[in-house]
Image: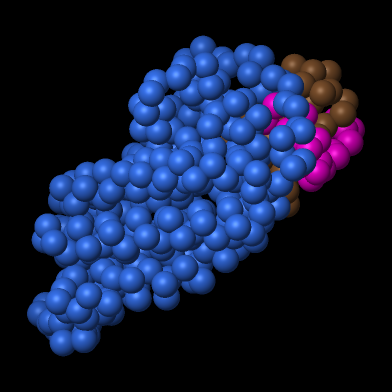
Chain colours: A blue, B brown
Amino acid sequence: MLQQFADWLTYNIFGLVEKTKTADVINFFLYDSLKIILLLLVITHFMSLLRYYLPIEKLRDFLASHKFFGLDYFLATVFGAITPFCSCSSIPLFIGFVEAGIPLGVTFAFLITSPLVNEVAVAMFVGLFGWKITAIYVTAGILIGMIGGAILGKLKMEKYVEDYVWKIKMKDGAKKREREKFSWKVIKSISKEAVETTKKITLYVLIGVGVGALIHGYVPEGFFEEYITKENPLAVPLAVILAVPLYSNASGVIPIIQSLVAKGVPLGTALAFMMATVGLSLPEALILKRVMKLRLLLTFFGVVSLGMILIGYGFNWIF
Amino acid sequence: MNIKILGTGCPNCQKLEANTNQALEELKVKGKIEKITDIGEIMNYGVMGLPGLVVDDEVKVSGRIPATEEIKTILSGHK
């Protein structure tokens, strides 16, 4: 139905001639951006509702009061996935987790998965790659958090956390807060928030899909196959290393990545690049430097980069 | 009424401040908005998700940006 609407806009409203390059690019752009924005609206509504009743403070207390022998790593990554990641929250999150006595490794599991798996990334993946690859991607994001967190936990890095972090004591102000019962008013408020979230990233989505549509239309089929092959063992690590200093949000990068994959870039290499752009970045490092000593910060980035490289190889091997 | 906005200065915190200002204006209430950027002080409120909205030392919202309408409801309950 969306395709028919995009066709109608392209051929009837804009009067473009079918099967021409321009028409194809415009049609592709319209269809993909409509689909993604609709998906974003649906998923952000659902996630906003979930978060209204399950705020991070509650999730943290659940983690702190249940010792699960390894299952807490898994739970931390799942909580990371449902919490929206705003880099400005990473400091209070880090301190809050550590303060509640949650092990450093579990805290890292949360911090690693949170930017990688979130409602925006999931909506874009479903729209562009389909359910199957989305499911594999989410699993990969969770695995990277669990394994990375477990390794960082084993390294006993507690002494490389800035000293003042251990001294902060939290009050439970946010926990006592009353939440309204599910009602029309709550729905309205949540809906407004979801629309606001979607609106905020629409521009990035449009730019991303636009660039993606141009690549789809004008770059010849299999163009990248000559340069970036699966057989080249350096391609994945190189993609990760190049991407770390870059900073971008998922909404702009994923459509471009999808079009590159369509033109012959191996999926694993492209995903490793995308994960490194979204999950590791210089601004993020600068923020985290306030709570971590350099050695811990470098180890953190090193372990996560390694995880992303492995995931890249894994995807290239499966597909 | 003493209103505090907890946040380290990211765009989300600025958005919350703008919404709160608008809510005050629409309610025609005079209130002072104070911005708390010190991380130790933010943690003191038990808030981990930013931005946070505190009215008369009571945490009302954290980890999301409430719409102006919602802030109006919160503020009118506090007059």
Q: Is residue A192 left or right of residue A163?
A: left
Q: Nearer the viewer, residue A4 or B49?
A: B49
Q: Is B33 covered by the magenta stretch? A: yes
Q: Position of residue B71 (x, y in %)?
A: 69, 30
Residue plotted at (41% across, 27% down): A72
Q: Nearer the viewer, residue A220 or A40?
A: A220
Q: Position of residue B51 (x, y in %)?
A: 66, 40
Q: Quadrant of the C terminus of chain A?
A: bottom left
Q: Quadrant of residue A205?
A: bottom left
Count of numbered marks: 0
Residue plotted at (76% across, 32% down): A168
Q: Is residue B35 left or right of residue A247?
A: right
Task: In the rendered view, tell whether residue A19 sits above or below residue A80.
Answer: below
Task: In the rendered view, tell whether residue B1 sits above or below residue A215.
Answer: above
Q: Quadrant of residue B63?
A: top right
* Magenta-drawn segment: B24-49
Residue plotted at (83% across, 18% down): B79
Residue plotted at (11% across, 77% down): A18
Q: Position of residue A60 (x, y in %)?
A: 54, 26
Task: In the rendered view, tell whether residue A146 sits above or below residue A201.
Answer: above
